[in-house]
Image (spheres, helix red, strand yellow):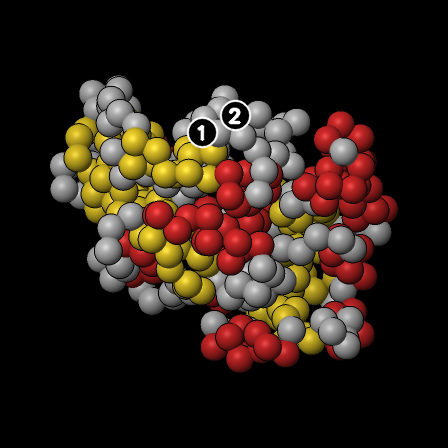
Amino acid sequence: MKAARLHAYGPADVLVIDEVPEPTVGPGELRVHVAASSVNPVDTKLRKGALKVVMRWKLPHTTGLDCAGTVLEVGQGVSGFSVGDRVFCAPDPAGQGVCSEQAILKASETALTPDNLSDAQAASLPLVALTAYDCLVRSANVQPGDKVLILGGAGGVGTVAIQMAKALGAEVSVTASPRNRELVLRLGADHVVDYTKERPQDVLEPQDVVLIAVGGDGGQTAIRASRKGARLAHIVGDLPLFVEKYGHYVGTLAAGLNMARFWLSARLAGRRGANVVKKPDGLALSKIAQWVEEGAIVPVIDSEFAMDDVAEAHRRVESGKVQGKVVVLHTR
């Protein structure tokens, strides 16, 4: 079977399509025919080796952190899934990736695909939707009537987070460029801050919750734009920036200090700051699937590529011009 693999860390050109043996299912697992996967910003950072201090793969390694497909085989001890079921998943990134014609998924990390989604749409959701869920539900505990600010509204996480916050009953503000204004309004944003010429703290009322889906000074912006007692959820994404600037080991230390600085600054300002890392979770993914079935969350797909063009898909993500998600179709 085909799999998109890297044999060395580096630019998008290191990705190659290899012929590899079909995987073998084990207890608690599903063997899945993968119809589509997606490319996330973290995929490109992992490929470049910017995170290998904290996650070093044994090479060659199959890329891809979320997917959708059809169950081919059910492992011993698995309940709730049958051969032929359509499923989607964002597995533990420490294992082999899912940009391949078949993949082994843990049943506990997998959910049934909503009937109103195509495989391409389903593949675009798991990683970003679980990240938004961990930020808004688990960490910030968003309640009806909360004022929620999303820093970075047009990216993969942001486009889902806008819709999820609205489904939770929040009043949603986002930062976005003028190019992305219509997109975030269509997704349900109540207020849009043009970050090219405005600061959230200058144009919005103090916020109850801030999801920080941008790097740089996003943590400090969140503190300034929120009220005392606010809940701040920071997606841990600055490590690659520090690694590129200072090298792997010094950069990792600098990123850790930066996260600690955010947490301490938030605490001293009377806010509750949390650095959030997505957790594989089939039950949470099932809850997200319910929102999708109700029409509360609709995937936003920027572009689609064939598996043979996976390097081009990575380059598209690295262009910085993506609205929503980039999807890799394993069959056309």
Mark 1 falls on what kind of element?
Answer: strand
For residue 212, which quarter of the picture? bottom right
Q: Is residue 260 visible?
A: no
Determine the residue located farthest toward the left in the rendered image: 83
Mark 2 falls on what kind of element?
Answer: loop
For residue 210, which quarter of the picture? bottom right
Mark 2 packing: few (<14 Cα in 10 Å), some, or many (20+)?
Answer: some
Residue labelled with disc 2: 57
For badge 1, the amino acid type reads His
Residue 303 percent coordinates (x, y)? 41, 63
Q: Is residue 97 visible?
A: yes
Image quadrant for the N terminus?
Answer: top left
Image quadrant for the C terminus?
Answer: bottom left
Apparent side of residue 163 relative to residue 45 in the rendered image (left or right): left
**Nearer to me, 7 or 319:** 7
For badge 2, the amino acid type reads Trp
Residue labelled with disc 1: 61
Residue 35 percent coordinates (x, y)? 26, 47
Distance of label 1 from label 2 (alpha carbons): 7 Å
**Label tally:** 2
Apparent side of residue 187 relative to residue 277 in the rendered image (left or right): left
Residue 18 percent coordinates (x, y)? 35, 33
Apparent side of residue 275 relative to residue 86 in the rendered image (left or right): right
Q: In the figure, 287 relative to 153: above or below?
A: above
Q: Residue at the location (70% across, 65% down)? A: 207
Mark 1 packing: few (<14 Cα in 10 Å), some, or many (20+)?
Answer: some
The reply to whether the C-beta atoms of the residues labelled 1 and 2 are less than 8 Å apart is yes
Q: Residue at the location (58% across, 59% down)? A: 319
Q: Residue at the location (26% across, 25% down)? A: 21
